[in-house]
Amino acid sequence: MRRTLTALASATLLATGLASTAAADPPHNPGGPCIQDQQDVSLESVAGYADVVRELARIERTSGGLVTVDSAGQSGEGRELLYATVGSGPTTFWLQARIHGNELHSTEAALQILDLLASGSPAARTIRDNLTVIVIPMYNPDGAEANIRQSTTPSVIDLNRDWENFAQPESVAFWRLWRDTAPELALDLHHMGEAPVVDGTDDLNQFQIGARSIDPSRMTDEQWLTNRQMAMVSVEALDRYGPVNVAHYPLIDITNAALSRMLMGGTAPAGEQAVTEPPTRGAIFYEVRSVGQKSNGQLENLFRIPTMAVLLAAANGSLGSQDVSGYPDLPFASQGPCGM
Ligand SMILES: [Zn+2]
């Protein structure tokens, strides 16, 4: 009962927040829904490892041969590192989710995207004809089951800081898959904090675009251009979708992140040769706000809609002519209190 009341209150806050934003009314903190103090975040409505196993099997079985599911290896606790392949086009596109185990909704979004890619829609056909899409719905199944950011076994570390040391079996397995499939484009799905605010406004920031996990000086000119093109396709798709305030992710320079090393090459697990000519010419990430188990549908939309737009643009060739002049004008955001 208590939860129901909280949910109702949150729904009201959401409606109020959106209305205030639209009317540019007096300053306010972003509306909810928000995670309440003392709230028990229920994971029942969030895709877990067993859901990934079951859903991938279902999609493969019903896809009429369009989707195949394989394992890249095993996690520290022995779970299969499952990925799906769909499409037969010459350009390989890498889509990964949940490298951080407690970033909940990217897994469900990745499964929805895979379902769409296996469908009979014209967009899905275009994507399958022109791309080979690798979909990794749960990069970190041990962390997901423990609902923590990191791996669990043998070490508790951030897997998105392990593409230099390769201390964890997940990193080794997915590095090998990256080397063997040689993706030209990569997209990594994340969640950020609960309630950032767009700088200079009172607007709740629901989505941040990460076009640079490393400083652009570490990229080729082509990589930096492609990253911004992928970013602006994503931003424009969200603009068409509606009530989303987009901001830049902070300007980081993290060389041991998975995407960073896809762009830079130069590292390899023990016993492997480093890749000196990286195949990846574009690799970006999304950060969607976190609100526990609430607003699942909207959070999944915020992953799915821009991802499908980038896939389609890569498939139909429009990505290469995407205008990036609006990129420097995207605002930044700062963390703020939620729902007050
Ligand atoms: Zn993350």
Image (cartoon, rainbow, N blue to C red):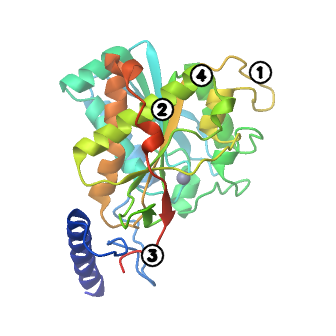
Task: Answer few, some or many: residues within 10 Å of disc 2's Cα (few below 14, many 20 plus, some between 14 and 19).
Answer: many
Task: Answer few, some or many: residues within 10 Å of disc 4's Cα (few below 14, many 20 plus, some between 14 and 19).
Answer: few
Residue 180 placement, left or right of 184 = right
Identified by mark 4, the residue type is Asp
Q: Can residue 87 be seen in this view?
A: no
- Taking the spot 26% from the left edge, 25% from the top edge, the residue there is 124
Residue receiving disc 2: 228
Residue 165 placement, left or right of 191 = right
Identified by mark 1, the residue type is Gln
Q: Is residue 241 visible?
A: yes
Ligand 1 neighbours mark 3 (CB distance < 8 Å):
no
Q: Which of marks 1 and 3 is in front?
A: 3
Residue receiving disc 3: 337
Residue 298 percent coordinates (x, y): 28, 56
Q: Nearer the viewer, residue 279 or 66?
A: 279
Residue receiving disc 1: 273
Give whichever of discs 1 and 2 has the lower sequence position.
2
- Taking the spot 35% from the left edge, 77% from the top edge, the residue there is 339
Residue 230 percent coordinates (x, y): 43, 31
Q: Considering the image in quadrants, where does the N terminus appear?
A: bottom left
Looking at the rendered structure, the secondary structure element under dot 3 is loop
Residue 313, located in which quarter of the rendered image?
A: top left
Looking at the rendered structure, the secondary structure element under dot 2 is helix
